[in-house]
Image (cartoon, rainbow, N blue to C red):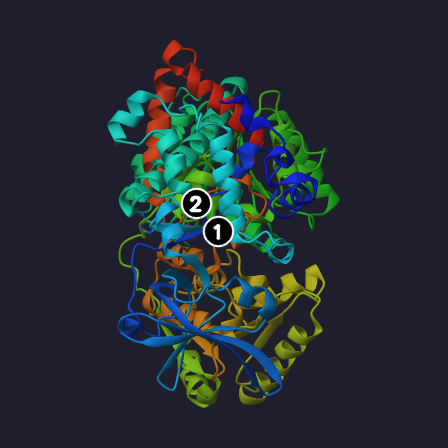
């Protein structure tokens, strides 16, 4: 890489200390190199010249060749304007200035061929162009003309200080001439040949000064590929380093427990997706390196049985296993589910939560320590220092986003060699994003629901239709079903949200009175034991309706609940709506989700409601969410350096991302430390790149 590119930006002719300061502050441009990497946001097509009688109201810039035939100053509503009549061989139009009259009037040349450029106004059949850019035709033809004119990122401060797009363009030309276009190649010849990429030098020239749209497209492709390639290289390297450094237990045997369960006690056939994921987990566990795997599966896709089979592999190899859930209720439900599976095999399972009495805890603690207890299910209580294992080999974490990195690392310390970690989540993360974010974490996906499920029917109803909705609920309750009514609670302390919920609860209580109907209510202001008590009443079928805030969002399983009503649904994000809907449809009955909204909806809200009504597929929904909100707003992605991309777009460029990942994987497979002579250039660029981009490690 040319040393010149490391020169501080103020040394570039035309920049100086003042502009240099603005470049640094506004765009983070410190060096020549940074300016070179300031890629245009878009391009204007200046290849086309219009005739005045061809102009149409299209809100885009257009350029016209003609002459000024007349200049005058006009006063309109006590405002002075400078108006020049501009003509070509088809018609006439006005050029208008509201400011800088004197200076402009002096510079305008009458009857000289010129090119004007700008957006037109159309009024009463008359065309005018305010503040056009003007160039004499002769000059225009002499200047290097690029058909596509780049528009650079800018800020108010920049334009306020006269650093216009034109100025940035000029500085870019200056930069190219000062460094003599001495840009070294940053991708290996083999990849360039296989993908038919243009050289780095040609890419840089054409991204800033495109010769034509074809070369521009090639330049963009090459630079996007390069950016994604080096990010993938870094993510995959992190992963390899982790596997080498962090030794783990090798679960070499598939033994009694696993085989006995698999052949004699499996309550149903596994879906193909479950089998595939199990295979991935088994191959991880067989290696003497710690597993760090994220298991994604939509609500109801059957993650629990996969978790249980994984636990059996630990037991087969003489290890203990634990499963940690974010709430008592969830831990309780997992305990019941896992116990039911384990019991026929004579495996003991216990539950450890904060509400256990000291005496019970002591029993559990000592059973874990002497190894007589093989499987423990629990909450954060598992993390306490008092909880010691004889030989913990596997830790499973349900619903990952509720746990922080700190807590996970405490699990690691529960054995001399860290246990294998399986993180389960029902929050679908679009594949492309998962690949970029968790490139250093292995991801398994259960992308298929067990057979025979009745898809949940989702409808969108306006508040004005509430009576009909209530009638529907009455019918469902009469059939013995249970109902959720959920209110938004964006912030637990938001008094308004709380009031909405309590008003709603009062209304529902009036329409569904005791003794015929029993209602539970759960919200953030209840104490944990009150919450648990109300939840339990509903879980046990003692109440018909559960009025709640989103506290019920995660994992609760009440198969008898068949209707989910979401109030003010327009206030929820798509992934949250989908999570909430996943609370129903868990039993044999047809289930329903009713989205209640006001009548006035924003465009985004309409798209969200339509998406929910039309799709039950969590990944499809996550893709729409990603498009609506952008990757920066998806759960857990905010801190990610991966998303500060210069030119690539994780949504639009997924194909390039996949290709980049393939090539990065192949390269590291052949030469994991980039030691071969032919890879020295990649190593150099890679090292530079890693210094610049600090990629967020998900689980370290
Ligand atoms: P989640 O992935 O949401 O945790 P669960 O593991 O709770 O899903 O499974 C949801 C329901 O589907 C459970 O009642 C479970 O017994 C059932 N189930 C899981 N896998 C299968 C399968 N392959 N065939 C039939 N039913 C299954
Ligand atoms: Mg679950």
Read off the residue under disc 2.
433
Q: In the picture, which quadrant includes the C terminus?
A: top right
Q: Position of residue 656 (x, y in %)?
A: 33, 40
Crowd rating for badge 2 (residues with CA inside 10 Å; few <14, some 14–19, many 20+): many
| SS category of the residue bearing label 2 | helix
Work out whether residue 82 or residue 618 is closer to the camera in this orientation and state it: 82
Q: Where is residue 228 in the image (x, y as percent from the top left)?
A: 41, 36
Q: In this view, does 213 lie to the left or right of 580?
A: left
Work out whether residue 436 or residue 309 is closer to the camera in this orientation and state it: 436
Q: Are marks 2 and 1 in contact (CB under 8 Å)?
A: yes
Res 512 seen here: yes
Distance, label 2 to label 1, CA atoms, is 8 Å
Name the image quarter holding residue 111. Answer: bottom left
Name the image quarter holding residue 699. Answer: top right
- Residue 490 position (above or below residue 393): below
Res 644 seen here: no
Q: Position of residue 149 (x, y in %)?
A: 40, 51
- Residue 531 position (above or below residue 329): below
Work out whether residue 608 or residue 160 is closer to the camera in this orientation and state it: 160
Q: Position of residue 63 (x, y in %)?
A: 36, 62
Residue ID at (34%, 49%): 141
Q: In this view, does 12 lie to the left or right of 493?
A: left
Read off the residue under disc 1.
631
| SS category of the residue bearing label 1 | helix
- Residue 607 position (above or below residue 252): below
Q: In this view, does 348 lie to the left or right of 662?
A: right
């Amino acid at each position: 890489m040319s040393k010149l590119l490391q020169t501080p930006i103020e040394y570039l002719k035309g920049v100086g200390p003042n502009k240099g300061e603005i470049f640094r502050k506004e765009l983070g441009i410190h060096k020549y190199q940074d300016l070179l990497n300031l890629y245009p946001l878009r391009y204007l097509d200046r290849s086309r010249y219009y005739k005045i009688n061809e102009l149409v109201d299209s809100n885009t810039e257009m350029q016209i060749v003609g002459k000024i035939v007349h200049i005058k100053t006009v006063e309109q509503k006590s405002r002075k304007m400078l108006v020049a009549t501009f003509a070509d061989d088809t018609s006439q139009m006005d050029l208008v200035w509201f400011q800088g009259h004197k200076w402009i009037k002096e510079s305008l040349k009458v009857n000289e061929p010129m090119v004007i450029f700008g957006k037109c106004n159309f009024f009463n059949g008359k065309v005018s162009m305010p503040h056009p850019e003007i160039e004499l035709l002769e000059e225009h033809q002499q200047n290097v003309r690029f058909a596509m004119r780049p528009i650079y990122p800018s800020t108010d401060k920049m334009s306020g200080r006269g650093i216009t797009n034109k100025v940035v363009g000029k500085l870019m030309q200056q930069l190219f001439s000062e460094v003599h276009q001495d840009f070294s190649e940053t991708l290996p010849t083999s990849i360039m040949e296989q993908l038919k990429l243009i050289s780095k030098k040609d890419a840089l020239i054409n991204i800033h000064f495109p010769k034509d749209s074809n070369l521009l497209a090639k330049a963009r492709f090459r630079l996007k590929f390069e950016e994604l390639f080096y990010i993938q290289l870094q993510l995959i390297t992190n992963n390899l380093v982790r596997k080498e450094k962090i030794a783990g237990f090798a679960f070499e045997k598939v033994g009694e427990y696993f085989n006995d369960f698999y052949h004699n006690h499996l309550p149903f056939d596994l879906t193909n997706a479950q089998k595939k994921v199990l295979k991935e987990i088994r191959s991880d566990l067989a290696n003497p390196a710690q597993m760090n795997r994220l298991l994604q599966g939509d609500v109801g896709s059957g993650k629990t049985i996969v978790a249980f089979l994984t636990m059996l592999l630990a037991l087969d190899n003489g290890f203990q296993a634990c499963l940690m859930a974010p709430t008592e209720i969830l831990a309780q439900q997992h305990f019941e589910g896992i116990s039911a599976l384990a019991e026929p095999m004579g495996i003991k399972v216990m539950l450890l939560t904060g509400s256990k009495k000291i005496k019970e805890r002591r029993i559990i603690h000592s059973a874990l320590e002497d190894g007589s207890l093989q499987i423990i299910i629990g909450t954060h209580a598992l993390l306490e220092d008092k909880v010691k294992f004889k030989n913990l080999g596997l830790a499973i974490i349900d619903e990952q986003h509720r746990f922080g990195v700190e807590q996970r690392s405490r699990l690691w310390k529960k054995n001399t060699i860290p246990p294998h970690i399986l993180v389960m989540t029902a929050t679908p993360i679009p594949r492309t994003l998962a690949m970029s974010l968790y490139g250093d974490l292995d991801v398994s996906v259960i992308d298929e629901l067990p057979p025979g499920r009745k898809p949940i029917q989702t409808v969108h109803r306006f508040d004005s239709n509430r009576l009909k909705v209530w009638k529907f609920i009455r019918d469902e309750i009469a059939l013995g079903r249970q109902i959720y009514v959920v209110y938004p609670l964006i912030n637990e302390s938001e008094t308004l949200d709380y009031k909405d919920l309590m008003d709603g609860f009062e209304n529902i209580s009036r329409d569904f009175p005791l003794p015929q109907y029993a209602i539970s209510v759960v919200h953030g202001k209840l104490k944990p034991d009150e919450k648990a008590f109300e939840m339990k009443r509903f879980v046990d079928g003692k109440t018909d309706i559960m009025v709640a805030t989103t506290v019920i969002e995660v994992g609760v399983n009440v198969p008898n609940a068949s209707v989910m009503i979401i109030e003010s649904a327009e206030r929820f994000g798509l992934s949250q709506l989908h999570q909430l809907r996943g609370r129903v449809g868990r039993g044999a009955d047809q289930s329903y989700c009713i989205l209640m909204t006001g009548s006035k909806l924003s465009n985004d809200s309409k798209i969200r409601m339509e998406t929910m009504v039309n799709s039950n597929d969590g990944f499809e929904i996550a893709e729409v969410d990603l498009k609506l909100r952008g990757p920066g707003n998806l759960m857990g992605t905010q801190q990610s350096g991966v998303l500060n991309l210069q030119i690539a777009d994780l949504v639009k460029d997924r194909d390039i991302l996949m290709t980049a990942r393939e090539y990065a994987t192949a390269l590291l497979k052949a030469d994991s430390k980039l030691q071969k002579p032919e890879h020295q250039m990649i190593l150099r660029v890679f090292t530079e790149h890693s210094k610049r981009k600090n990629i967020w490690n998900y689980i370290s």
